[in-house]
Image (tube, helix red, strand yellow):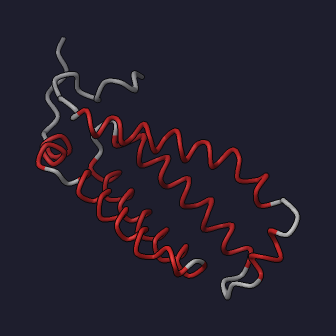
């Protein structure tokens, strides 16, 4: 499976969408790998206990959101429209659960969610996700 080509070779993926998906694959993959160290550092548990959301739920939502973002970024590279909606949903879940913890960052997070939605719903992106698959050439 070639990550650089869409499922149908006739389909043209916008460059900004390719860069967007690879950026999130790299960043969320990095967070998935390095987050264990951050969650187990001294004082992390105590700091997270000061928030009304239980520690276990915070960690579960964090990892679930990373998995959602990685999965949706990968499948957006292959023109799956459901992955675009899953990505936006995951970003909104992150916006609300993260800002239960850090309310001062709400405006910046909301701005980023808006930018993500704009990128994923530009007219070129819509054409890429909405095209009917062409039959495979023999």
Most extreme residue toward the bottom, as rendered? Answer: 52
* Residue found 18% across the figure and 11% down from its top: 138
Which picture quadrant has residue 47? bottom right
* Residue found 85% across the figure and 69% down from its top: 43
Q: Where is residue 111 drawn, in percent x and y? A: 34, 67
Q: Where is residue 59 drawn, in percent x and y? A: 69, 67
Most extreme residue toward the top, as rendered? Answer: 138
- Identify whether 1 is placed above or below 19: above
Which picture quadrant has residue 131? top left
Residue 24 located left or right of residue 122: right
How many marks the image carries: the answer is 0
Q: Where is residue 80 drawn, in percent x and y? A: 30, 44
- Relative depth, front residue between 72 and 118: 118
Most extreme residue toward the right, as rendered? Answer: 42
* Residue found 42% across the figure and 69% down from its top: 108
Which picture quadrant has residue 87? bottom left
- Identify whether 108 is placed above or below 63: below
- Relative depth, front residue between 28 and 74: 28
Residue 120 located left or right of residue 98: left
* Residue found 21% across the figure and 35% down from its top: 14
Quadrant where the N terminus is found in the figure: top left
- Identify whether 29 is placed above or below 15: below
- Identify whether 17 is placed above or below 121: above
Q: Where is residue 125 drawn, in percent x and y? A: 19, 45
- Relative depth, front residue between 74 and 110: 110
- Relative depth, front residue between 101 and 133: 101
């Amino acid at each position: 499976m070639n990550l650089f080509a869409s499922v149908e070779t006739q389909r043209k993926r916008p460059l900004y969408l390719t860069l967007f998906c690879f950026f999130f694959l790299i960043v969320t993959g990095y967070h998935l790998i390095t987050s264990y160290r951050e969650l187990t550092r001294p004082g992390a548990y105590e700091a997270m206990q000061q928030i009304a959301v239980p520690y276990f739920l915070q960690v579960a939502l964090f990892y679930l959101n990373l998995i959602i973002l990685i999965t949706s970024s990968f499948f957006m590279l292959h023109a799956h429209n459901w992955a675009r909606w899953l990505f936006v949903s995951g970003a909104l879940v992150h916006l609300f659960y993260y800002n239960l913890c850090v309310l001062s960052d709400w405006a910046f997070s909301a701005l980023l969610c808006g930018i993500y939605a704009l990128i994923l719903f530009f007219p070129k992106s819509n054409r890429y996700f909405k095209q009917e698959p062409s039959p495979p050439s023999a």
